[in-house]
Image: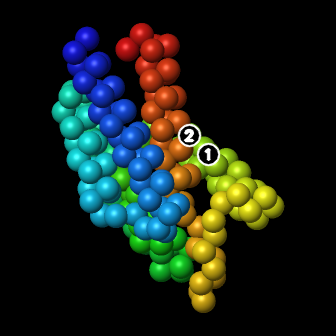
Amino acid sequence: MLREFSTNVVLVATATLLFYAALTDLREFKIRNNLVLALAGLYALYVVLAGEPWMQVLWHVGFAAAMFVVLLAFYARNWLGGGDVKILTVCFLWVGMTYALPFTILLLIFACGYVIMAEKFEWVRVLHTKRGRKVPYAPLVAAALICVFVLKFFVLKTNGI
């Protein structure tokens, strides 16, 4: 009972921090390093409180490292900003391989919605620079990860875990 409560508190704190990162990215087009480090720290706290198996944690870390390398290629081509690479890496740390596909699908769905809101309705701010348009991705990433938390919660509850 205490373990479930404490892990849920960590998830709520993580969702709150993701929401803050999203708002900051929307306003400033920046994702601060301390936010990313705090998200990684919350993952470590969650692992300890939930009693996650260390082998699974190592797989999460390895998967996040592999995704970081892939995301660096996108950064090198100016398809993603540095903050986007950082927050996506820490999100892949949280989801691991088990929830990477749902996370990615949710990210795609939110990205499509974002494009419609930005291009068609102009409801979202897009920064025009010499190198092209800059779009804050943290809101999409935050929404996708929070949805994965909810999905994981219901999967665990359904399975009686």
| Looking at the image, residue 60 lies above or below residue 119 | above
| Looking at the image, residue 1 lies above or below residue 78 | above
Q: From this viewpoint, is residue 92 visible?
A: no
Q: Position of residue 111 (x, y in %)?
A: 65, 55
Helix, strand or loop for disc 2: helix
Q: Residues within 10 Å of mark 2 (few under 14, many from 20)?
A: some
Q: Hey, which quadrant is residue 127 in on the image? A: bottom right
Q: Is residue 128 left or right of residue 68?
A: right
- Report the quarter where the C terminus lies: top left
Q: Amino acid at mark 1?
A: Ile
Residue at 59 percent of width and 49 percent of height: 107
Q: Position of residue 88 (x, y in %)?
A: 44, 57
The residue pinned by badge 1 equals 105
Query: Do callouts 2 and 1 mark residues in contact (Cβ within 8 Å)?
Result: yes
- Report the quarter where the N terminus lies: top left
Q: CA distance from mark 2 to mark 1?
A: 5 Å
Q: From this viewpoint, is residue 132 visible?
A: yes
Q: Is residue 82 left or right of residue 6?
A: right
- Viewer-proximal residue among 157 and 83: 83
Asked which colour scheme the image uses, the reply is: rainbow
Q: Amino acid at mark 2?
A: Pro
Residue at 42 percent of width and 54 percent of height: 21
Residue at 42 percent of width and 10 percent of height: 160
The residue pinned by badge 2 equals 102
